[in-house]
Amino acid sequence: MTNLLVGLAGNPNSGKTTLFNALTGARQRVGNFPGVTVARHEGTIMHQGATINLVDLPGIYSLSAFSEEEVVARTFILNEKPHLLVDIADATALERSLYLLVQLRELGLRTVLVVNMVDELERSGRRLDSDKLARLLGLPVVQTVARREIGLERALDAVVLAAGQDQPPLTISYGPELDRMIDALADVIERADFLTQHAPPKVTAIKYLEQDQPLIALGHRENPQLSAEIEARAAQYSQRCRTAYGESAADLITDYRYGFISSILGQGVVSMETHLRRRSLTDAIDKVLTHWLAGPAIMLAVLYAVFWMTISLGETPMGWIESLFGLLADLGRAAIPDGLLQSLLVSGVIDGVGAVLGFVPLIALMFLAVSFLEDSGYMARMAYMLDRLFRMFGLHGYSIMAFIVSGGIGGGCAVPGVMAARNLRSPKEKIATILTAPFMSCGAKIPVFTLLAAAFFPGQATAALFWITLASWGFVFVAAKFLRTTIIAGPATPFLMELPPYRLPTCKGLLLHSWERVWQYVRKAGTLILAVSILLWAAMTYPQLPKERLDHYDRTAAVVNARHEFEDQHKAAQLEALEASRAEEAIRHSLAGRIGRVLEPVSALAGFDWRTNIALVGGLAAKEVIVSTLGTAYSLGDVDLDNPRILSQRLEQDSRFTRITAISLILFSMLYAPCFVTVIAIGREIGHRWALFSVAFNTTLAYLVAVLFYQTATAWSRMG
């Protein structure tokens, strides 16, 4: 049986991931590419006696390694030596799509060209002659409609067939002058056997002329002296081109490649079936959705609809999960005698982790909505509309993806959001984006906001989440403007972005994307959140009250029982108050309680007591811990074990928590230090100093905002 390693390459928005999902379905594995945190999706397919291990590479436009995605794709192609590459081209943008194919073929890689979305090409009155294109390119060409799973079998047939055939490298003439320069460099490279294990000599020569920094750095490591010599000669040649033609060698290379592509397409590869060009559905929709006035209004309406759908549909299954964990807690109390083991299981594990997992339906629905907006093409329109606003505050249009992924619509994660900023070419705009992306309403914060909204804004949870999200955007703009005019001042860079056509996402694609994100949330709850919940339970349990204090409560309870020989409401109320006093004193005496009380003189200005401080300190590890810690803390102090209340009801009935306190806590949770994993991601992207700066800057801003709101609102309420 033949085992094939096949890379799936293509431009963003070409339907590459849709094709990958259609081919592999549930047979996918998700990991990271070696040395980076970019997700690596793999799937195994059995076809015609061959085992095809398909790797979905990041969407790229070329092999020029400027962005992290381009570095990852090229590293895979050059280092892992796949048997074959499948290049996915957008049928409606063939000229742009074939640029990547030209580079792959110059490397001499076996390639199958899959032209996707041919249905959209045909709707515009055009038809692709794939047989002619295959003859001109000298490789298999297959037409597909991935979202409708049309042409998949033909694509797999072509992969198996092409894997056993030779495809000589593509040779393009870059003009007499430039060809001589390339040949001169290639001759030096070939004679010295320099980097030949990574690419053909001619390709290496072209990369030096293009000033491809990753390859040049690799050359410096292999042979510093020779690499410096070749780099100097390439710079000299490029200057000669600039003098003679007014363009650098890299620009000329790009022009000739597109000239080659035009010569291919100009031979009747795409023919018109009608003389009347119909305005595409995408253009018609964009006239409304990107209108200067209607567009932003519709965008806000879409945002509100996402929250309404999430809250209204998620409420019932959330109740089921809360009831399930309530039942598990009752079983734990019944099966395990009173003591530390029962407390650990019920308060530390079940109430702590259960408080987080109870929000899984909410998070799943939100991820489903965000995946629909991404796959449909509407997310790109949001970036287009927000670009002008972003530039006013020193950000870039491409920053939108970092903010959306971080939770700009709700339910994202700051870690991939931080990584999404890699596409920003300006270092200063990248830093500003990364430092402010954690302000967004990530999936870890949504449970906190929903918890407080349910307790203090009953019946208004949708509106509350909507305004919280808008507030997070507002703080992003204010903080970014401050940073871009002070610490990281500098000019803005221009914004250029492709608007993909609108498409109806497939159910399979939506479910796969949503499941992947939900599973990450659940896995986090079962690992990091569980570990932190247990640690915080221990910190809230130890050291225990001294023996004399425990004896005091036992004696007092005995006195109450002696006064009331028979059960009555007065006796029960006294015993409940006594137990509540004991539980609160025990938590205050614990390590966590002591830390919370040390911080209380400072946090009290924002309305936070020592118990809230414990949750916020735990939130430094992961924001979900805020909910789980409150669940643990209130479980430890809950004396009515036969009638356990959900956490939102416990907070609502706590006289120390008011609506003003809740809003202050929302503001602080929105802005303060990113979670531990995000801080690590920031350090990897822009350096450890900026990571530490984000902790200090975000927490300081959060504290000032919370104090200002709490003091102002409290003073206003007293005046009222």
Image (cartoon, rainbow, N blue to C red):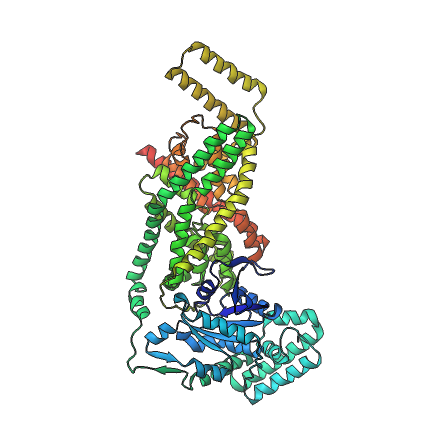
The quarter of the rendered structure image containing the C terminus is top left
- Determine the residue located farthest toward the bottom in the rendered image: 176
Residue that appears at 52% across and 73% down: 159
Residue 450: name its quadrant.
Answer: top left
Residue 595 lies, with reference to residue 310, above or below; the image says: above
The quarter of the rendered structure image containing the N terminus is bottom right
Residue 137 lies, with reference to residue 398, above or below; the image says: below
Total numbered labels placed on residues in the image:
0
Return the x and y of residue 692 as percentages of the image width and height.
56, 50
Residue 265 lies, with reference to residue 86, above or below; the image says: below
Return the x and y of residue 118 as percentages of the image width and height.
39, 74
Return the x and y of residue 561 as percentages of the image width and height.
45, 13
Comparing 228 with 180, the one in front is 180
| Residue 358 visible in this rendered orientation of the protein | yes
Residue that appears at 53% across and 29% down: 342
Comparing 382 with 480, the one in front is 382
Residue 51: name its quadrant.
Answer: bottom right
Return the x and y of residue 300 as percentages of the image width and height.
32, 55
| Residue 56 visible in this rendered orientation of the protein | no
- Determine whether, in the image, residue 471 is placed left or right of residue 532: left
Comparing 244 with 150, the one in front is 150
- Determine whether, in the image, residue 228 is placed left or right of residue 27: right
